[in-house]
Structures are given as structure tokens and as C-alpha cells.
Image (cartoon, rainbow, N blue to C red):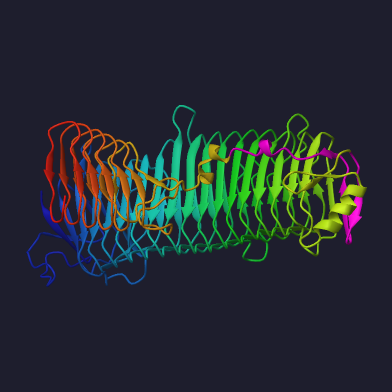
């Protein structure tokens, strides 16, 4: 193993003040044959593209170090270091070092790993046909990521990262993973593509924290793949998001207060498609944009938060699919809501204050039915058309400006409608005159087809609805992960978890979260470390050997099975060691310690125990 110093072209052999250790010098602009373990330190005056190779038929792992700002080149990606066949490269860029003028080209190598310290800048990285890894600290600037043939491609960066010029990953039978912290800026489009087969799925994942900015579009395309695009709150996408892949598992998660420039496409047939949009998000921030999930023979799940605006349509124009939609309050759709093509089974629940500027159209599902429930203060400018099948429509109180309600179908449909607010008695009289009947919950329903009536300037025309809606036909939202709601219990997993305050489980339950400090926590299996934090908590450590700290408050700690260590912390706590040997420490407060089965150690601590 030899340490070399790469200096400016034409200066090799001269004294360089940066080469304080007297390393042998290599002139930039040459092709150098490396041995396994060689290290190359890049001088600040580096000014010409350089290549590192191995002897024919051999391999070598080499390291390249950037320890000082590059001044011999002046603009990003002006020069390059190329790693040729047989070379596996690790490139380390010290914190704060400006290395942007030097591209790192590994397209024919055996793999590249780039480690960029906080505040550094990096030239374009061109990946290999093997394993490629990019690690960046906080505040790192990248000037291009291109990984087109990688077997495994991983990009992991901290907060405040910036990606310039392009971000492209395209490879089949591969795993591509991008993880960025908060405030990431991508001054380009995000392109990820590749395919697998049924027995060897492709995998593509892009995750960014809060306040992410993508100035271009997002395009993720594959076949036989598991794909995920997720951004946190306050995200901005400059153009469209297009995630489509047949025979795949596809997920888009967009946080609250976000903005998508144009349309979200999720046209992926024969797939499981999940799309979640957070509160106060705008789809079509540039002026027009829709949500389009035209995915036939699929399971399509759409979760929409409160106060979401869609500047165009919501179009689930799929065929032969099961579709679930749940939206919060104050959904605004400037155009139409189209829930399906032919023979879809739809379950839709929308909160109060829905506005639809066009029509609300169901599926022509002759063999099955759909369930649609809309809350109070809704307003549909056009018509409500169910189109066919044994459907159930539940409508809350209409908005005062609502002028016409026309719901069509092909018979056997159930309907339940709330009277306008403050006009219940008068509405009831008009409905009764039209032979409608009032239900036990106060809503009104027709008793036969074509029982038309008008009330207070509103036309109620439900031609093919002849009975009350069946509340038991409500959809089962638990079959889609994006609909899973907090259940009040913070659950661990079967793995060994570290569960401290702030830990959030798959259902959204959090230790010391916004729902209060008195938590119920279950460690489940695995050797868990649990800190319950503030409040009066109940902790069941579950199976295996766990460590539990109750923290402040009057806590109840149960060790469960396994050799556990329980510490009550402050407050009057109850500790039960459970099965097997346990160590129980009451700490401060008047505590109750129960050893249970096994050889236990009980330490009362301060207070009357």
C-alpha cells in the first residue's frame, strides 16, 4: 500500500507546500496503475482529468482523499477522476472541502463509495455496474448523481443537501435507495427507472424529510417492482409526479402543506397503489393539476388530508379494480371527481365542506356496488352520477348554495340525505310529500324510484334510488396501510427497538406525542430499550430481554417474558418483573415492586416501597 499525491499536470517531482509528508507525486492528466490498498491525496492545484486502473486481470481497492479546496479547476464538473475496470473506489471528501470541479466517474469500475463531510461540495458521480454508495453529511452540495447500471445504489445525506444538474438512477434487477434529511433541494428532475421479474422484484425508494424542494418532475417507472416516493411536510415539486409500474407495489406519500406543480400520475395496472396527501396541500400549484390513478386490475387506495386543493380532476378511471378513497374536511376539486370505469368496487368517505366544480361520477359497476359517504356543507356544481350496480350514497347537509342534486344509477340503490341546516321541519314535510321516509338517524330516504321533489330552490332527483343506504356496506379501510389510524398504543416490532420519547409506530402513535404524555407502550418481541418519558405511562415490554425506564410520573411497568431490567424513575410506580429473572429498581417515590417468576433483584430506592 502506497500513499500518492496527485498534483497539477506538469508539476510532478517539484516541491509542493501542501505535500507535507513527502508522498510520491503523480501528475494530473495521466493514467496510473494502482495496487490494492493504494491511497491518492488530491492537491488543490489538480487541473486535468486522471484515470486509475489496475494491471490486466487484477483488482484493487483504492482510496481517494480530498483534503483541500480544488483551485486548479474553476467550475463544477470541469475535470474528472475515472476509475477503470478492476478498481473498487472509496472517495473521502473532508468537511467543508470544495471538490465540485472534479467528477468521479466509475462506469467501468467494480464499485464506488463516496463519503462527503458536512458542508463539502462534490462533482458529478457516475456509478458502476456494481455496488455504489453515496454518504453525505449536512449541507453537502452534489453536482450530479447518475447511476445507470448499479446492482445496488444507495444515496444517504443529512439535512440541507443540494443536488444540481441531474439526479438519475436507472437499472434493472437492482435496489435503489435515496434518503435525504430536511431542507433538501433538488435543482433537477428525479428519474428512477428499472424492471424486475416476478421472482426477482426491482426496488426503488426515494425519501426526503420536511421542506424538500424538487424544481423539476418526479418520474419513477418500472415493471415487477416495489416503488416508493415520500416527502415530508412543506414539500415543493415543480412539475408532475409520475409513478407507474405494472405488477408492482407502488406508494406515494406527500406531507402536509406541500405543493405539487401539476399532476400526480399513478397509472399502474395489476398493482397495489397507495397515494397519501397531507393536510393543506395543493395539487396543481402552477395553475392546473389532477390526481390520476388509472390503474386497472389493481387495488387503489387514496388518502387525502384536510383542506387539500386539486386544481383539476380526481380521476380513478380504472377498470376491474377495488378502490378506496378517504378524504378529510374541506376538500376542493376544481373540476370533476371520477371514481372508476367499468366494474370497479369503490368505497369512498369524504368529510365536511367538500367542493367539486364539475361532476361527481361513480363506476359503471353492474355486478358490484359502491359506497359513497359525504359529510355536511358539500357543494357539487354538476351532477352526482352513480352509473350502475347496487350502490349506497350517504349525503350530509348540503351547502346553502347547492342548487341541484341528481344521482343516477341502474336500480337497487340506497340513499340517505340530511336536511339542510335549520330547515329540518320544512324539508321533512317536502320529503314526506314525495313519499320519502325518515330514518332512525334523522336522515331521509326515498321509498321508491323517481321520487323527485324540490326544496328551497334545490332539486332532489334520485331516479333509481328506492331505499335507505346500508351503513353496514361501509368499506374496510384497514386493508390499506395508508389508512391505518393511531390506536392509542405505541407498538414496537418483532425486532429489537429503541423506543424513546418521540418514537412513532406504524399507526402514528408516539411516545410523549401530541395526544398527551400518558402513554400505553408495548415493546412486542425483541430485546427492546424503552424510555416512557413524562406522564403516567403503562409499559408492557413483551417478549425477550428488555430494558425499561418509566421516567417521570406514576408508571406501571411490566417486564413480560425474558430477563428484563425495569427502572421506575420519579413518581409512585408499579413494577412487575414477569417471567424469568428480572432486575427491578423503584427509584424515587413510593413504589410497588413485584418480582414474579424467576430469580429477581428488587431495589426499592427512595420513598416508601
Q: Name the outermost residue toward the left.
A: 21
Name which residue lies at 37% across and 45% down. Answer: 153
**Residue placed most toward the observer, 118 or 80:** 118
Name which residue lies at 84% across and 35% down. Answer: 411
Indicate the position of residue 487 as horizontal and vertical percent values.
46, 46
Asked whether 466 falls inside the magenta stretch, the response is yes
Name which residue lies at 65% across and 39% down. Answer: 474
Q: Is residue 201 left or right of residue 427?
A: left
Q: Is residue 454 left or right of residue 517?
A: right
**Residue placed most toward the observer, 392 or 215:** 392
Q: How many marks?
A: 0
Q: Is residue 238 left or right of residue 541?
A: right
Indicate the position of residue 100 as horizontal and vertical percent values.
33, 65
Question: Does residue 19 show up?
Answer: yes
**Magenta segment, which residues?**
449-476
Q: Is residue 22 left or right of residue 100?
A: left
**Residue placed most toward the observer, 596 or 86:** 596
Residue 239: quarter of image:
bottom right
Q: Is residue 128 above or below residue 369?
A: below
Residue 46: quarter of image:
bottom left
Q: Is residue 247 above or below residue 482?
A: above
Amino acid at each position: 500500500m502506497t500513499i500518492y499525491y496527485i498534483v497539477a499536470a506538469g508539476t510532478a517531482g517539484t516541491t509542493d507546500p501542501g505535500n507535507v509528508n513527502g508522498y510520491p507525486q503523480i501528475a494530473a492528466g495521466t493514467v496510473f496503475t494502482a495496487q490494492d490498498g493504494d491511497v491518492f491525496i488530491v492537491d488543490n492545484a489538480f487541473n486535468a482529468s486522471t484515470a486509475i486502473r489496475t494491471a490486466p486481470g487484477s483488482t484493487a481497492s483504492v482510496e481517494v482523499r480530498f483534503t483541500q479546496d480544488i483551485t486548479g479547476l474553476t467550475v463544477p464538473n470541469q475535470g474528472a477522476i475515472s476509475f477503470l475496470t478492476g478498481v473498487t473506489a472509496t472517495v473521502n471528501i473532508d468537511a467543508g472541502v470544495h471538490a465540485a470541479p472534479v467528477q468521479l466517474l466509475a462506469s467501468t469500475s467494480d464499485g464506488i463509495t463516496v463519503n462527503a463531510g458536512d458542508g463539502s461540495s462534490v462533482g458529478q458521480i457516475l456509478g458502476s455496474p456494481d455496488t455504489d454508495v453515496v454518504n453525505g453529511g449536512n449541507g453537502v452540495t452534489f453536482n450530479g448523481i447518475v447511476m445507470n447500471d448499479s446492482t445496488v445504489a444507495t444515496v444517504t445525506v443529512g439535512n440541507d443537501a443540494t443536488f444540481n444538474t441531474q439526479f438519475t438512477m436507472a437499472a434493472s434487477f437492482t435496489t435503489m435507495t435515496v434518503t435525504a434529511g430536511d431542507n433538501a433541494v433538488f435543482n433537477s428532475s428525479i428519474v428512477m427507472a428499472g424492471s424486475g421479474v416476478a421472482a426477482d422484484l426491482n426496488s426503488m425508494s426515494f425519501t426526503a424529510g420536511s421542506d424538500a424542494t424538487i424544481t423539476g418532475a418526479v418520474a419513477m417507472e418500472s415493471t415487477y417492482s416495489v416503488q416508493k416516493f415520500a416527502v415530508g411536510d412543506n414539500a415543493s415539486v415543480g412539475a408532475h409526479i409520475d409513478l407507474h409500474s405494472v405488477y408492482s407495489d407502488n406508494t406515494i406519500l406527500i406531507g402536509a402543506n406541500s405543493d405539487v406543480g401539476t399532476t400526480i400520475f399513478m397509472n399502474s395496472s395489476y398493482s397495489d397503489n397507495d397515494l397519501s396527501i397531507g393536510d393543506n396541500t395543493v395539487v396543481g400549484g402552477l395553475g392546473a393539476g389532477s390526481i390520476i390513478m388509472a390503474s386497472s386490475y389493481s387495488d387503489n387506495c387514496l388518502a387525502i388530508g384536510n383542506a387539500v386543493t386539486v386544481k383539476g380532476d380526481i380521476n380513478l378511471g380504472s377498470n376491474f379494480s377495488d378502490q378506496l378513497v378517504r378524504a378529510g374536511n374541506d376538500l376542493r376539486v376544481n373540476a370533476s371527481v371520477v371514481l372508476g370505469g367499468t366494474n370497479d368496487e369503490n368505497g369512498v368517505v369524504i368529510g365536511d365542506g367538500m367542493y367539486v366544480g364539475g361532476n361527481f361520477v361513480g363506476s359503471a359497476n353492474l355486478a358490484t356496488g359502491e359506497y359513497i359517504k359525504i359529510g355536511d356543507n358539500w357543494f357539487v356544481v354538476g351532477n352526482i352520477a352513480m352509473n350502475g350496480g347496487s350502490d349506497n350514497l350517504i349525503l350530509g347537509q348540503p351547502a346553502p348554495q347547492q342548487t341541484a342534486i341528481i344521482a343516477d344509477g341502474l336500480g337497487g340503490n340506497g340513499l340517505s340525505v340530511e336536511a339542510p341546516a335549520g330547515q329540518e321541519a320544512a324539508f321533512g314535510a317536502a320529503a314526506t310529500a314525495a313519499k320519502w321516509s325518515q330514518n332512525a338517524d334523522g336522515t331521509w330516504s326515498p321509498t321508491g324510484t323517481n321520487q323527485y321533489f324540490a326544496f328551497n330552490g334545490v332539486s332532489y332527483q334520485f331516479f333509481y334510488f328506492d331505499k335507505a343506504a346500508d351503513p353496514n356496506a361501509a368499506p374496510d379501510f384497514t386493508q390499506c396501510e395508508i389508512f391505518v389510524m393511531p390506536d392509542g398504543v405505541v407498538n414496537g416490532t418483532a425486532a429489537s427497538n429503541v423506543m424513546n420519547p418521540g418514537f412513532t409506530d406504524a399507526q402514528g402513535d408516539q411516545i410523549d406525542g401530541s395526544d398527551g404524555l400518558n402513554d400505553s407502550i408495548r415493546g412486542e418481541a425483541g430485546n427492546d430499550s424503552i424510555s416512557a418519558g413524562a406522564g403516567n405511562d403503562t409499559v408492557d415490554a413483551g417478549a425477550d430481554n428488555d430494558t425499561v425506564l418509566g421516567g417521570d410520573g406514576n408508571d406501571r411497568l411490566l417486564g413480560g417474558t425474558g430477563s428484563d431490567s425495569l427502572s421506575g424513575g420519579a413518581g409512585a410506580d408499579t413494577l412487575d418483573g414477569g417471567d424469568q429473572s428480572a432486575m427491578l429498581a423503584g427509584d424515587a417515590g413510593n413504589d410497588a415492586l413485584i418480582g414474579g417468576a424467576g430469580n429477581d433483584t428488587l431495589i426499592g430506592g427512595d420513598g416508601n416501597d
